[in-house]
Amino acid sequence: MTQDHSAVENYKGVWGNRIGYGKKPALILIDFMQGYTTQGEPLYAEAVVKAVKKTQAVLEMARQKNLLVIHTNIRYHQKDQVDGGIWVKKSPVMRAMVEGNPAAEFCEEVQPLKTELVLTKNYASSFFGTSLASTLYSAQVDTVILVGCSTSGCVRATAVDAVQHGFRTIVLRECVGDRHEAPHEANLFDIDSKYGDVVSIDNFYEYLNKI
């Protein structure tokens, strides 16, 4: 029996309940910035490049269906990144996320429209220190569709906070990426078991065509 099968069997009947979609979803694109998709950058991850490509069609479909679309990015005080607190001390690679650095710009394939909301954050979760929860509540959103990077960092943190704020949490498997497959798969397994549903793009499209 493989390790994956052992985990599935261990969790069976305890974790892994399906939460499903609600009535009004919003698409949240988490930190699709060029630092993750530009070769030579410390944050570069080939899996994120693939996730961006897969997300292009998802974003277009969300726009066609008039879903609320929200993009997040990270920006720090240019001089010393003091607003990154302990996180940039633990993960100094994040100090690159300052205004004027191309690594901090959105990936061209999933650039926000001028009409779409961009929320800037300083930490992993898209909810922490931002107006995201209030924005979603006021728009009567009950389901968040998460795509972005990285799976083990900002995606996971956002998924945990999303369910804690009372939202049905859906992660599109093909549209999230990390720098290594092991933490990527481990965190998808954990999210799917405890915090939300990890589904395919096709599953999401089926849902959109019904609402």
Image: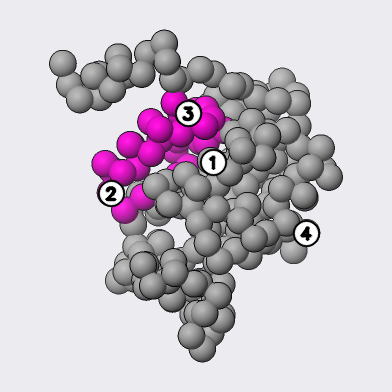
Which corner quadrant holds the N terminus? Answer: top left
Label 1 close to label 4 by CB (< 8 Å): no
Foreground tag (4 vs 2)? 2
Residue under circle 1? 159
Identify which amino acid the numbered label 1 is placed on: Ala
Of callouts 1 and 4, the N-terminal one: 4
Tell me which residue sits at (68%, 34%) in the image: 166
| Coordinates of residue 159 in the picture (x, y in percent) | 54, 41
Q: Residues within 10 Å of mark 1 (few under 14, many from 20)?
A: many
Label 4 close to label 2 by CB (< 8 Å): no
Per the model, the C-alpha gap separating discs 4 and 3 is 34 Å
Per the model, the C-alpha gap separating discs 1 and 4 is 25 Å
Question: What colour-coding does the image apply?
Answer: one colour
Task: Name the mark on residue 52.
Answer: none
Q: Secondary structure at mark 2?
A: loop
Of callouts 2 and 3, the N-terminal one: 2
Q: Secondary structure at mark 3?
A: helix
| Coordinates of residue 184 in the picture (x, y in percent) | 34, 42
Identify which amino acid the numbered label 2 is placed on: His
| Coordinates of residue 206 in the picture (x, y in percent) | 62, 22
Task: Name the mark on residue 194.
Answer: 3
Residue under circle 2? 180
Task: Give the residues in magenta.
Answer: 170-199
The residue closer to the viewer here, 31 or 162, is 162
Q: Residues within 10 Å of mark 3 (few under 14, many from 20)?
A: some
